[in-house]
Amino acid sequence: MKYYLAPLEGITTYIYRRAYHAHYRAMDKYFTPFLVPHTKKDFNTREKNDILPEHNQGMYLVPQILANDAEGFLNTVEKLKAYGYGEVNLNLGCPSKTVVSKGRGSGFLYYTDELDRFLDEIYTKADIKISVKTRIGKYGADEWGKLLEIYNQYPLEELIVHPRIQQQFYKGKPDLDAFEDAMRECRCPLCYNGDIYTVEDMNKIKERFTGLSCVMLGRGILRNPELTELIGSGEDRVDARKLRAFHDQIYEDYQEVSCGDKNVLFKMKELWCYLGMLFPDQEKLLKKIRKAEKLDRYESVVDELLGHANIRI
């Protein structure tokens, strides 16, 4: 099974990816949080830091582009090629209202004629591999058949499917029947994405889709960065020493690039919104992390929380 790390805006930046890659089973592919085309000659500082090859050493990194105009997409591709990239990913999955209101992400899925023309132009003109990350529709799963027909017309490097519609955001359950349709009809390599949080979740997907060879993990990895190793080993304990080393690398790197305690703590608290789920019986300590206003106070709480050799899941 191949494993990909999903892009999550503001979280899975190069700082997170670099620490993950150093301490856990390497992902087969990593994806950047989306880049939006703009008219500047080069990327801004934040974007550049995230895609610089020296910030992503040893990883197969795929920049993701959020666009609904072919010219902007193609211009961004040219900028990325200058940094040595040979593959990009088109974001047709983001359900955010601010994205969808502009007809981007999963908001683009409803406009099938425009989407078809867009794909025709980018696949005709771009001399680079292009994969697609998609939802199964905007308003209903009945849109999925038409979308599959469109995707099958083009040489997608692969199709990464999160089987929800835009209107669900991340609520309800993924539509596994819709993904089964993709398994049956899709002409390009296929990757599953959605609600894999535990070894049991992964086993259920494997059992239902016996021919599946690739999954993308997002929130499941943020909750438990050791997840792919546990899937392979069958163990039920998380190594707290490894988790501590992973945490410390992220923490130290944010201190290097951020100005002041407040910014560093904001980023770390965002991470603990996910990691905290490994500690369901430690709400008092997690609350202290959320309330910490100084780095020394934060460090002392983390020392206490991670002071165990193993964490049972």
Image (cartoon, rainbow, N blue to C red):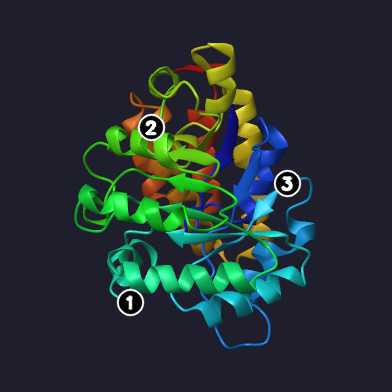
Q: Distance between the residues labelled 2 and 3?
A: 27 Å
Residue 269 has which mark? none
Which sits in the foreground, 244 or 48?
A: 48
Amino acid at the residue labelled 3: Met
Label 1, on which residue? 102
Residue 127, quarter of the rendered image? bottom right
Residue drawn at the location 42% of the way across and 35% of the way down: 183
Task: Give the vertical position of 31 relative to 275 (above or below).
Answer: below
Task: Give the vertical position of 11 relative to 288 (above or below).
Answer: below
Q: How far apart are marks 1 and 2 (CA)?
A: 34 Å
Residue 256, quarter of the rendered image? bottom right
- Residue 77 percent across, percent down from the top left: 64, 72
Label 2, on which residue? 277
Q: Is residue 175 left or right of residue 313?
A: left
Q: Say if residue 266 shows up in the picture.
A: yes
Q: Is residue 208 left or right of residue 118?
A: left
- Within 10 Å of disc 3 (Cα), the crowding (few <14, some 14-19, many 20+) is some
Amino acid at the residue labelled 2: Met
The secondary element bearing badge 1 is classed as loop
The secondary element bearing badge 3 is classed as loop
Label 3, on which residue? 59
Decide which of tag 1 and tag 3 comes sooner along the chain. 3
- Within 10 Å of disc 2 (Cα), the crowding (few <14, some 14-19, many 20+) is some
The reply to whether dot 2 and dot 3 touch (C-beta < 8 Å) is: no
- Within 10 Å of disc 1 (Cα), the crowding (few <14, some 14-19, many 20+) is few
Of badges 2 and 3, nearer the viewer stands 3
Amino acid at the residue labelled 1: Lys
